[in-house]
Image: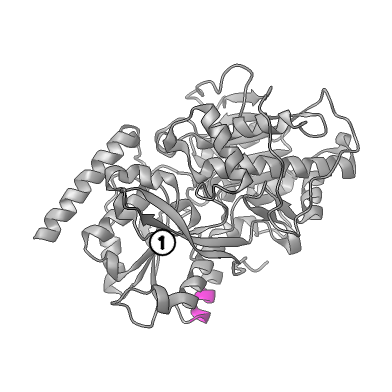
């Protein structure tokens, strides 16, 4: 009875936190929204939904106008330009990454416009925040203050989608004639647009890294901002297998049994692909059938967690993000089994928004693991973190937006700038297109994102290949910090057979 009363108390506390952090907007979530990974994120249903990473847009006088409600018919477009902020020196991610190159042409007076489609309105956007908006504006300011692309100004046109897959497709169809590069933020968008992008030869940098969609066609035009979800899951399983004796709960035996809980859409199913399951089996790790979680701040996941425990799970892996991770953490704690299982998840689950939702109960996240494919805010000695932190502070943004989504978005624009420079040098500005941009990216191969991470387009890959394992740890003052427990390592290759 004490545990039951504690469970009810935790549920009430989480509900209060959700209301304080945007729960009012979230009440509009029926039918279940197509959320992003966001995007950090990243998320949504196969070809019928969207996320992400999450970014993941400057304008001359205002950050952005409020997008219209009739987005399907007339998506809002906003061109971001006229940046003014200064940039710090670049730092290579790895020795293999190509250093920034000079320019063969002077493009002063020209403007290169990229496209971005995501959500700034609607229930999911209200919850996931606008870190990608702030980072886009700040990164464009920094890039253009540093000379832009061989003197050309870099600009972004934003189009509202509400993270709805139908609107993602509608916006794409209205911009495809002009677009050469598009930023998207959900698995649903990745799934729905992959073949269209390949046919139209338009590059997409995607926060929703659905492996089957990205690798369905060899040498496709969708590039992931983070490792594909099946690679991240396989990497976590590999780390568990290598370190089980040191990290396993006292009550656990020698066999690793992983329960996976994921959103009921393409994002949620992204980890447990046949290739990832085959890799786990090769290590002797048992992976239970996927437990689906409704994309709603009011979802009850006690049944899913109990199913895992009944079937012997000693690991709970989250293929979700934001409020959904908080739900899992609160439920595992309320059931009194936190010390009997390892709890962790995909990179988008290890984000500030989770801690925002826990609020005064943030201590509940103590011990949570994340597969993190980039440097984080905790790496204060990294030049890219110092630079991004300065831009964030100058922008006066809320601390709740100091997320990995901001960092990833900010750094990605510098990698894109370098690819564009290489494309101009290789094929000429008059031939700049999705095709020549992809060729330039493949020619560089390992593309430094300002030291935060590196895109890997070598040997047919279309996403980063490295990650670290980090853990949230409670401090004496009641705050949570993220700590690296495993240095960067190469993730298993779980690309689908082509």
How would you rate the neighbour count of disc 1 (Cα within 10 Å): few for under 14, some for 14-19, many for 20 or more? many
Left or right, 153 with reference to 299: right
Question: Quick one: 99 or 163, which is closer to the camera?
Answer: 99
Residue name at image x 57 percent, y 61 percent:
467
Q: Quadrant of the C terminus?
A: bottom right
> Does the rendering let one see residue 434?
no
Question: x, y (%) of residue 257?
Answer: 38, 75
Question: Quick one: 89 or 488, which is closer to the camera?
Answer: 89
Left or right, 61 with reference to 199: left
Q: Is residue 281 magenta?
A: yes
> Does the rendering let one see residue 76?
yes
Q: Which residue is mark 1?
A: 344
Question: x, y (%) of residue 253?
Answer: 34, 82
Q: Quadrant of the N terminus?
A: bottom left
Single out the residue that lies furthest toward the left. Answer: 1
Left or right, 198 with reference to 166: right
Q: Label 1's element?
A: strand
The residue range painted magenta reads 277-283
Question: Quick one: 93 or 253, which is closer to the camera?
Answer: 93
Question: x, y (%) of residue 216?
Answer: 65, 59
Question: Quick one: 364 or 297, which is closer to the camera?
Answer: 364
Residue name at image x 54 percent, y 47 percent:
380
Q: Is residue 214 magenta?
A: no
């Amino acid at each position: 009875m004490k545990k039951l009363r504690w469970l009810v108390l935790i549920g009430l506390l989480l509900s209060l936190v959700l209301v304080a952090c945007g729960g009012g907007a979230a009440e509009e979530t029926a039918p279940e929204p197509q959320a992003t990974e966001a995007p950090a994120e990243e998320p949504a249903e196969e070809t019928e939904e969207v996320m992400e990473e999450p970014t993941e847009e400057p304008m001359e006088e205002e950050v952005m106008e409020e997008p219209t409600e009739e987005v399907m018919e007339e998506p809002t477009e906003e061109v971001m330009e006229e940046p003014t902020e200064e940039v710090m020196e670049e730092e290579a991610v790895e020795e293999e990454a190509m250093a920034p190159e000079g320019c063969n042409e002077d493009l002063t007076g020209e403007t290169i416009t990229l496209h971005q489609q995501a959500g700034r309105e609607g229930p999911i956007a209200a919850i996931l925040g606008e870190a990608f908006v702030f980072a886009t504006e700040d990164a464009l300011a920094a890039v253009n203050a540093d000379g832009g692309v061989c003197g050309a100004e870099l600009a972004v046109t934003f189009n509202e989608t509400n993270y709805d897959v139908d609107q993602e497709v509608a916006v794409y169809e209205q911009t495809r004639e002009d677009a050469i590069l598009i930023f998207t933020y959900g698995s649903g968008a990745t799934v729905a647009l992959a073949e269209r992008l390949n046919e139209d030869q338009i590059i997409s940098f995607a926060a929703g890294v659905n492996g089957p969609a990205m690798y369905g066609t060899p040498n496709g035009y969708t590039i992931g901002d983070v490792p594909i979800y099946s690679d991240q899951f396989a990497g976590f399983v590999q780390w568990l297998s290598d370190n089980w004796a040191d990290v396993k709960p006292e009550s656990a035996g020698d066999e690793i049994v992983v329960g996976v809980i994921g959103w009921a859409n393409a994002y949620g199913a992204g980890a447990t692909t046949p290739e990832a399951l085959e890799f786990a089996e090769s290590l002797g790790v048992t992976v239970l059938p996927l437990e689906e979680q409704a994309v709603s701040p009011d979802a009850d996941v006690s049944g899913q967690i109990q199913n895992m425990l009944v079937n012997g799970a000693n690991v709970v892996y989250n293929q979700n993000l934001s409020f959904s991770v908080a739900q899992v953490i609160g439920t595992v704690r309320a059931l009194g089994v936190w010390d009997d299982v390892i709890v962790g998840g995909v990179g988008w689950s290890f984000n500030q928004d989770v801690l925002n939702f826990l609020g005064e109960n943030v201590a509940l996240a103590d011990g949570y693991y994340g597969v993190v494919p980039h440097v984080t805010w905790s790496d204060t000695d990294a030049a890219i973190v110092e630079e991004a932190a300065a831009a964030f502070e100058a922008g006066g943004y809320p601390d709740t937006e100091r997320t990995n989504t901001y960092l990833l978005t900010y750094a990605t624009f510098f990698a894109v700038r370098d690819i564009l420079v290489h494309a101009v040098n290789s094929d000429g500005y008059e031939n700049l297109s999705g095709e020549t941009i992809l060729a330039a990216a493949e020619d560089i191969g390992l593309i430094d994102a300002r030291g935060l991470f590196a895109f890997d387009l070598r040997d047919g890959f279309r996403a980063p290949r490295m990650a670290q394992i980090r853990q949230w740890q409670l401090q004496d003052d009641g705050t949570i910090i993220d700590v690296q427990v495993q240095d960067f390592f190469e993730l298993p290759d779980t690309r689908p057979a082509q």
